[in-house]
Image (cartoon, rainbow, N blue to C red):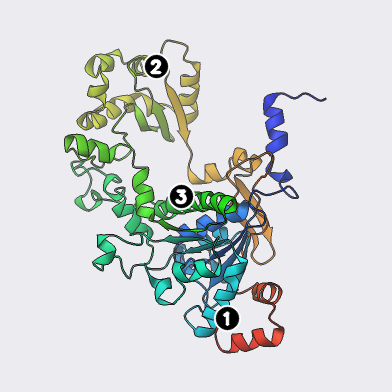
């Protein structure tokens, strides 16, 4: 029997390039993804598609509006940049579920699936006659996941505020408490007033955290359904998903009445644990416990800072963040990022302090590490040519996730799904297309 070093064994057994042909954890699971204008639903079904589920993406005949969400209206053929990534591994069909014929077709698909994901306003599907109460009778083991910023019930929905609302990332960020904590503090008066305001996170964190929680919940429900034969309804609010990872902000307010304000790049619970300027960019420094703070100050030759800010309470006082950083930057601004990393690595004294280089976007894109681990992949797609996408997150030895293809144009798989899965013939499908049903 061959023996390997641990790193070599792990690499051989989790190498993404070996995923092709291996079993997938969700083989045999079919998902209908009806997400409309929401990347929470799209991300949830993308994760399941990577794990082997057969995801049938259902768009309206004109295509989903999420295909248009792209910077500067930039598209590859018919599709925006964000959607190309979240279209991976999915079969794409069109269907107007608001028409009677479309509803009938949808109801024929339900018994052939295990999971439905939708992101419409609360009770929208119920009003169409396609709600959980109807669908569970068609398929008792069905897992039905509804995603909306406000959730499916509660005072805000009942009073009308969230009743007609689609699932919006910016709403999730605001309701989840994150927008208030992101951005420049109000008392940083050296910055213009209009810049010292609550700021949404730059990416769609509400959608992506909500989508990850939806995928986790759906997979858990699948295990239960397989064991008992019982499906269930899942209500996911991306705002609540974000709030659940909002660390200590709610607890601090509950205990003390204090509100975590905006603190820019600073961490309210620890200092040093933030970015500082170098001669050629930014670096991250950490050294917040007392011995580690002493180590950091020793490296930069500033023992006086240990005397001035001797305790964690001193160093986590927001009023001290800027002056402490300005003192540290008197040293770091004299050195390049590479020099700072070497200085920190060469330190052999007591305490532990960490320095990390903050990569510029182009530097991160060119980092060989990501391509070696397939975290970033250049894929030649049949429909969209060569595109750069993120690879599967999980490296698994037994049932590894896989990117089989990138995306599909609107309705690209109509014939495959309607003819093979539902038994329509070409003539019937052409008639449905002529009526605008598909």
Residue at left offset 62%, top offset 52%? 50
Of residue 215 and residue 228, the one placed in the foreground of this image is 228
- Circle on res. 299: 2
Of residue 338 and residue 233, the one placed in the foreground of this image is 233
* Residue 245 position within the rendered picture, expressed as x and y whole percent measured from the top left: 37, 42
- In terms of image quadrants, where is residue 77? bottom right
**Residue 253 versus residue 109 in the image, above or below:** above
Q: Are marks 3 and 1 in contact (CB under 8 Å)?
A: no
Quadrant (top left/top right/bottom left/bottom right) for the C terminus: bottom right
Mark 1 crowdedness (10 Å alpha carbons): few <14, some 14-19, many ≥20: many
Residue ranking furthest to the right? 1
- Circle on res. 188: none
List the residue tagged with mark 3: 213
Depth-wise, is mark 2 or mark 1 nearer the camera?
Answer: 1
Q: What element carries label 3?
A: helix
List the residue tagged with mark 1: 438
* Residue 420 position within the rendered picture, expressed as x and y whole percent measured from the top left: 71, 73
Cα separation, mark 2 vs mark 1, equals: 67 Å
Q: Is mark 1 on a helix, strand or loop?
A: loop
* Residue 71 position within the rendered picture, expressed as x and y whole percent measured from the top left: 45, 62
User: Residue 10, can we see it?
Assistant: yes
Residue ranking furthest to the front? 228
Cα separation, mark 3 vs mark 1, equals: 31 Å
Residue at left offset 26%, top offset 41%? 250
Question: Which sits earlier in the primary sequence, circle 2 or circle 1?
Answer: 2
């Amino acid at each position: 029997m061959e023996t390997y070093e641990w790193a070599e064994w792990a690499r051989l057994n989790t190498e993404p390039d070996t995923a092709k042909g291996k079993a997938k954890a969700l083989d045999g699971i079919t998902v209908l993804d009806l997400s409309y204008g929401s990347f929470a639903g799209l991300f949830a079904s993308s994760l399941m598609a990577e794990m082997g589920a057969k995801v049938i993406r259902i768009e309206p005949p004109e295509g989903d509006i999420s295909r248009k969400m792209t910077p500067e209206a930039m598209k590859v053929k018919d599709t925006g940049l964000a959607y190309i990534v979240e279209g991976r591994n999915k079969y794409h069909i069109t269907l107007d579920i608001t028409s009677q014929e479309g509803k009938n077709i949808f109801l024929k698909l339900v018994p052939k699936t295990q999971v439905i994901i939708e992101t419409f306003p609360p009770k929208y599907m119920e009003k169409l006659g396609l709600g959980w109460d109807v669908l569970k009778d068609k398929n008792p083991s069905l897992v039905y996941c509804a995603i909306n910023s406000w959730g499916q019930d509660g005072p805000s929905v009942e009073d009308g505020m969230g009743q007609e609302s689609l699932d919006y990332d910016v709403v999730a960020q605001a309701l989840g408490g994150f927008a208030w904590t992101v951005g420049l503090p109000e008392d940083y008066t050296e910055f213009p007033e209009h810049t010292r305001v609550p700021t949404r996170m730059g990416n769609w964190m509400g959608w992506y955290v909500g989508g990850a929680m939806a995928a986790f919940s759906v997979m858990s429900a699948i295990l239960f359904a397989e064991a008992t034969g019982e499906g269930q309804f899942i209500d996911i609010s991306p705002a609540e998903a974000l709030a659940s990872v909002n660390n200590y902000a709610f607890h601090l307010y509950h205990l003390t009445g204090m509100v975590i304000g905006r603190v820019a790049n600073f961490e309210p619970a620890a200092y040093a644990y933030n970015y500082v300027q170098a001669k050629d960019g930014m670096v991250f420094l950490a050294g917040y416990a007392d011995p580690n703070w002493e180590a950091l100050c020793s490296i930069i030759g500033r023992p006086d800072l240990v005397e001035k800010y001797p305790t964690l309470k001193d160093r986590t006082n927001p009023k001290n963040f800027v002056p402490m950083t300005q003192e540290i930057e008197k040293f770091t601004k004299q050195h390049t990022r590479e020099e700072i990393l070497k200085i920190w690595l060469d330190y052999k004294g007591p305490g532990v302090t960490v320095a990390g280089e903050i990569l510029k976007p182009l530097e991160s894109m060119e980092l060989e590490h990501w391509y070696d681990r397939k975290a970033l992949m250049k894929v030649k797609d049949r429909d969209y040519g060569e595109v750069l996408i993120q690879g599967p997150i999980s490296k698994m030895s037994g049932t590894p996730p896989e990117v089989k293809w990138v995306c599909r144009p609107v309705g690209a798989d109509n014939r495959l799904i309607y003819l093979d899965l539902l038994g329509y013939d070409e003539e019937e499908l052409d008639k449905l297309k002529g009526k605008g049903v598909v």
